[in-house]
């Protein structure tokens, strides 16, 4: 085996390493953009051991959810008008 052969192997391994590092960084960027934290639990009220009411904010909209041990259902979308009525 000649020195040029080992040089070629090292270059190929270096290029593969750079491609792998670039792929890992790109996947992290895509993951962070995909899961940007647009979901926030604003309030929670436990009705009993297995059932609760949850107010969730998704981007600019809020929803009242009923959460049970086996299902989640949207009870109502909370609008700005309904928020003003409940405050006064």
Image: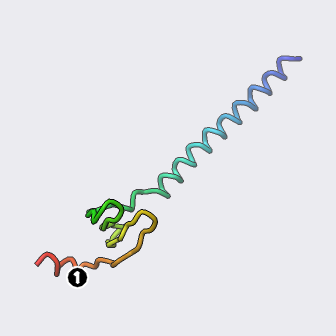
Label 1 sits on residue: 81
The relative height of residue 3 versus residue 49 in the rendered view (above or below) is above
Q: Residue furthest left?
A: 88
Q: Residue furthest front?
A: 49
Q: Is residue 82 left or right of residue 49?
A: left
Q: Nearer the viewer, residue 66 or 69?
A: 69
Give the crowd class for mark 1: few <14, some 14-19, many >=20 residues within 10 Å: few
Q: Residue at x 22, y 82 (%)?
A: 81
The relative height of residue 83 versus residue 58 in the rendered view (above or below) is below
Give residue 57's position: percent from left, percent from top: 33, 67
Q: Residue at x 62, y 44 (%)?
A: 23
Q: Residue at x 35, y 70 (%)?
A: 66
Q: Quadrant of the C terminus?
A: bottom left
Q: Is residue 76 left or right of residue 29?
A: left
Q: Residue at x 74, y 25 (%)?
A: 10
**Is label 1 in a helix, a strand or a loop?**
helix
Q: Nearer the viewer, residue 39 or 4?
A: 39
Tell me which corner region of the image, top left, top right, bottom left or bottom right, holds residue 15.
top right
- Exactly how many numbered labels are in the figure? 1
Q: Nearer the viewer, residue 31 or 72?
A: 72
Give residue 86's position: percent from left, percent from top: 16, 78
The relative height of residue 3 versus residue 83 in the rendered view (above or below) is above
Q: Is residue 66 left or right of residue 71?
A: left
């Amino acid at each position: 085996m000649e020195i040029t052969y080992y040089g070629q192997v090292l270059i190929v391994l270096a290029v593969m390493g750079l491609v792998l590092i670039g792929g890992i960084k790109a996947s992290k960027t895509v993951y962070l953009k995909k899961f940007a934290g647009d979901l926030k639990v604003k309030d929670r009220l436990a009705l009993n051991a297995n059932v609760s009411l949850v107010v969730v904010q998704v981007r600019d909209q809020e929803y009242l959810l009923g959460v049970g041990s086996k299902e989640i259902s949207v009870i109502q979308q909370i609008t700005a008008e309904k928020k003003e009525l409940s405050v006064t």
